[in-house]
Image (cartoon, rainbow, N blue to C red):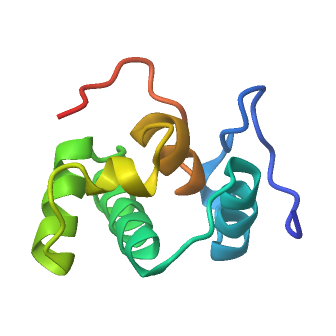
């Protein structure tokens, strides 16, 4: 990665302030995901939520965002990130791996 952010053993950023769109592109590449418009919409929403609230958004908020902005159905987030919200979306968006998580 061009900026050499520090990652934990599972590939999550240790410090979310080291995140950038270039970092997201590289993390997505490692996950086998080519980021498109809806991916970026979800990721930018997640980053904004994190900056405002200092916590990663629950998946239900991202599902609602995609529905409101793209007319996407409930399962769209899982189509965009097929290995899961925490495993891929949170990782690519530069979130730390949550200890416990509600899936909506």
Give the image quarter of residue 8. Answer: top right
Front residue (pair 54, 10): 10
23 lies above or below 82: below
Q: Is residue 5 left or right of residue 69?
A: right
Quadrant occupied by the C terminus: top left
Q: Residue at x 76, y 63 (%)?
A: 26
5 lies above or below 44: above
Q: Residue at x 36, y 18 (%)?
A: 100
- Measuring from the top left, give residue 35's x and y in whole percent: 56, 71
Q: Residue at x 18, y 52 (%)?
A: 61
Q: Is residue 16 left or right of residue 71?
A: right
Q: Is residue 67 left or right of residue 101?
A: left
104 lies above or below 20: above
- Measuring from the top left, give residue 12's x and y in whole percent: 66, 39
Quadrant occupied by the N terminus: bottom right
Q: Residue at x 13, y 74 (%)?
A: 71
What count of labels does the image hold? 0
Q: Is residue 60 left or right of residue 31?
A: left
19 lies above or below 55: below
- Measuring from the top left, give residue 85's x and y in whole percent: 40, 41
Front residue (pair 76, 8): 76
């Amino acid at each position: 990665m061009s900026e050499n952010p520090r990652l934990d053993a599972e590939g999550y950023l240790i410090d979310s302030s080291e995140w950038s769109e270039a970092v997201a592109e590289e993390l997505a590449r490692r996950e086998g995901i080519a980021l498109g418009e809806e991916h970026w919409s979800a990721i930018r929403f997640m980053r904004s939520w994190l900056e405002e609230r200092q916590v990663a958004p629950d998946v239900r908020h991202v599902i609602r965002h995609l529905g409101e902005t793209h007319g996407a159905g409930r399962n769209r987030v899982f189509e965009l990130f097929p290995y899961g919200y925490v495993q891929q979306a949170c990782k690519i968006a530069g979130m730390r791996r949550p200890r416990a998580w509600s899936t909506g």
